[in-house]
Image: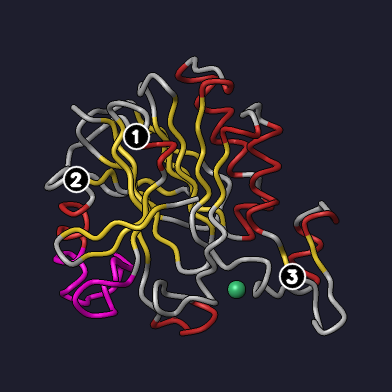
Amino acid sequence: MLQVKRVSQITLLHAPALDAIDGIAHAFSTRRAEHPNLTLGPTSSDNPMIPINRSRFLAAAGVPGWPVLKLKQIHSGIVQDMTDTWPSNEPLEGDAAVTAVRGAVLAVQTADCVPILIADRDARVVAAVHAGWRGTAARIAERTVQFMIQKYGVSPADLMAVIGPHNAVCCYEVGDDVRDAIKAPDVFVRKPDWTKPHLDQSRANQKQLLKAGIPENQIVTSSLCTHCRPDLFFSYRREGKHAGRLLSIIGLAP
Ligand SMILES: [Zn+2]
């Protein structure tokens, strides 16, 4: 379960399971501020409000002015190790970011895809994952945990993972291309009044986190659906290509 916080008129969501770890800062954004359109992306947009909204969100999340380690999301299975905070560097391409750098945040932007935040209980390393259906098919969540284990020597038994708001199984209709790409029949749901199967994105990613070794009781899943809740979230499927973007961030305190 996620909890709702309102700070300086900005509504954000946070996971008590991550709050309980000393030295971790994190938040999932919503669209709500004093107006209902607090978009935090896409970064490629020339909307001049985006950098201002991002600064306000970071401040509300308790990380004012912290640099964001830039990831250029490409719907892949690529995990990037973020070791450099030099601000003029080009963003690294990939869909998961891992870092042990302190005083900076990782961020993934979504509008229906699944954001996943991961931290170890000693606050040594954190990860942010963007898992759309292509990333899910490429096993991005599982690869991220494997990377944290191999590169940073953490034990999966010490990891806490939070699957944030996304287009949930109630709404996420998919075609044969998705079914063929994600070879796991048990993550698709069919109902008589649905014309096509729906993908359970949280179940699909939870299974990967479990397979990578994170205990079930250390995986928190939000049941909030971006498509069902236009009051809280942007949704690409509902609003099309001009939809705003949500930002999910996690970082290690300096
Ligand atoms: Zn829904």
Percent x, y of residue 35: 22, 80
Say whether marks 3 and 2 touch (CB < 8 Å).
Answer: no
Percent x, y of residue 85: 21, 36
Say whether marks 3 and 1 touch (CB < 8 Å).
Answer: no
- Quadrant of residue 41 within the rendered picture: bottom left
Q: Amino acid at mark 1?
A: Met
- Answer with left or right where residue 78 lies relative to residue 231: right
Q: Which residues are magenta?
A: 31-53
- Quarter of the render that holds ligand 1: bottom right
- Answer with left or right where residue 170 lies relative to residue 88: right
> Badge 3 is on which residue?
198
- Answer with left or right where residue 229 lies relative to residue 40: right
Q: Residues within 10 Å of mark 1 (few under 14, many from 20)?
A: some
> Badge 2 is on which residue?
62
Describe the element under mark 2 as helix, strand or loop. Answer: loop
The residue lying at 53 percent from left, 43 percent from top is: 78
The residue lying at 30 percent from left, 26 percent from top is: 22
> Badge 1 is on which residue?
82
| Mark 3 or mark 1: whose residue is earlier in sequence | 1
Q: Amino acid at mark 3?
A: His
Percent x, y of residue 5: 29, 56
Q: CA distance from mark 3 to mark 1?
A: 34 Å
- Answer with left or right where residue 220 lies relative to residue 241: right
- Residue 51, compared with residue 187, is above or below; it is below
* In-front residue for pair 51/4: 4
Q: Amino acid at mark 2?
A: Gly
